[in-house]
Amino acid sequence: MGNYKLKDLLKGVDNYYLNGDEQALISSLRIDSRAVENGSLFAAIPGSLSDGHDFIDHAIGKGAVAVLCEEMPEVKKGISYVKVENVRIAIGLIAHEYYDRPSEKLKCIGVTGTNGKTTVVTLLYDLFKELGYKVGLISTVEILVNDKKLETRLTTPDVISLHDIISEMVMTRCTHVFMEVSSHAVDQRRISGISFAGGVFTNITHDHLDYHETFSNYLKAKQSFFSGLDEEAFALINIDDRNGEVMVQNSKARCFRYSQRIMTDYKSRLLSDDELGMHVEIAGYRFHSRLTGRFNVANLTAVFAVADIAENIEAEELAEKMSGLNPVKGRMEMIALKPRIIVDYAHSPDALTNALNSLKGSLKEGKLIVVIGCGGDRDKLKRPIMGLIAIDHSDLAIFTSDNPRNEDPEQIIRDMKKEIPDDRENEWLEIENRKSAIKVAIKSASENDTILIAGKGHEEYQEIKGVKYFFSDQQIVKDILSKDI
């Protein structure tokens, strides 16, 4: 990008106090003082672990000519200081101007919810590509600009990177971008300055309470995304979730609803489900999908509805194109058929329940085995819940390690087992080593059995004591089946 006058970047920022030259030329935006260069504007973002205000002098030493802050530091000659109420919000609005308002030049559609975000945005990306559009994707699994893959570390990138990515999408003539919007991203204002053409709510269940502390806070974070949509945008909500209507209570957006239970804007139903896919009906149109699981009917309905609302695409064409969509990597992804082996990201109680119930419902014969762990340094309250769900909804549960991070994996497994009655000891095994757990599940299964390997999905690493080691559930399964291990 070129140089911009500071005053031009502040167009969208309200109630700021400027100490310094409003004509200062800004060549880059930075939130990490280590990345500052000559001509940078440094945003001093307060955080739970560190405060950007502590690094202002370091940023100036590296060449920053302007500082965005909430508390005025000791003023240095030749530096422009912009004091605002909330740096996180302000830097997003500044980035919006710096990158020439990119999100206003395409249709940016955000998807939020506890489960289903990745599936919905990825299916939308795939569908719109099949329909002939140039599109972008910002998901947990990957960031794509048309077919170019960018590195991704968070569900939603930092606020400056997000505007930069969308700007690149505009330059490559993308007409739409589909992005996951996590509750963390909303709470941390990582979507500040983004102009959304629409928002989708999939569901909300027990998750991320290690961050939000209470379900009420988690709910409010999701709700605030919809409260930020303007009158020109649309909001699509799943009203089978009891909090669906709560999402749009304070939203100005045009609201549409989808359901498998009641008549509404987009009514759907599952006609049949087996190991090869589902027959579904959405808004009166029937088609076969390669996806499995009742919960994926809701995801498909959201995709169908977005395409209809955003572009008014003919329903017959939608049904035809959607029948060819493949499952998303790590989301009910079938790796083998006999025995049927599924890898899924399910790492919350509701997601695990849905996955197991869907697989159980499609079983013609045989037993259901689940390999499951819980992440370390995350919500501990859900661990015993996950343990009970695993044995209640399967024939055999194998408790193992997930991403223990800085915790003892044995303690995590103990937490998962602590609510299980003693008389159910024959319904589960404990195998801490995840590779060994997967191998035992496969070796003990008959060809008519189904194995769900849950929790990691698309991830290709296992994090232990701050170090990420390569680990892919999919690859482990393939190696075992080919007798490589």
Image: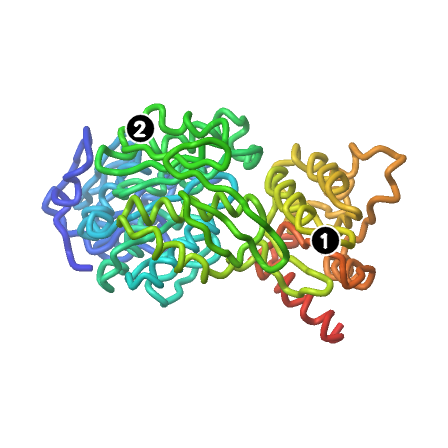
Amino acid type for the residue under numbered disc 1: Lys
Instruction: For marks 1 and 2, give the CA distance.
Output: 45 Å
User: In this view of the protein, which residue sits in the foreground, 88 or 187?
Assistant: 187
Residue on which disc 2 sits: 251
Vertical relation: 350 (above or below) 248 = below
Residue at 32 percent of width and 30 percent of height? 227
Lateral position of residue 143 relative to residue 333, left or right: left
As displayed, is residue 177 above or below residue 145? above
Q: Is mark 1 on a helix, strand or loop?
A: loop
Ranked by sequence position, the earlier of labels 1 and 2 is: 2
Disc 1 target residue: 364
**Residue in front for this viewpoint, 19 or 47:** 47
Q: Position of residue 381 (x, y in %)?
A: 66, 32
> Looking at the rendering, in which quadrant would you find the C terminus?
bottom right
* Crowd band around label 1 with a 10 angstrom C-alpha radius: few (<14), some (14–19), many (20+): few
Mark number, residue 205: none
Three-letter amino acid code of the residue under disc 2: Ser
Please give the name of the residue rendered at 48% of the width and 51% of the height, measured from the top-left corner: 119
Q: Answer with left or right where residue 482 lies relative to residue 320.
A: right
The mark closer to the camera, 1 or 2, is 1
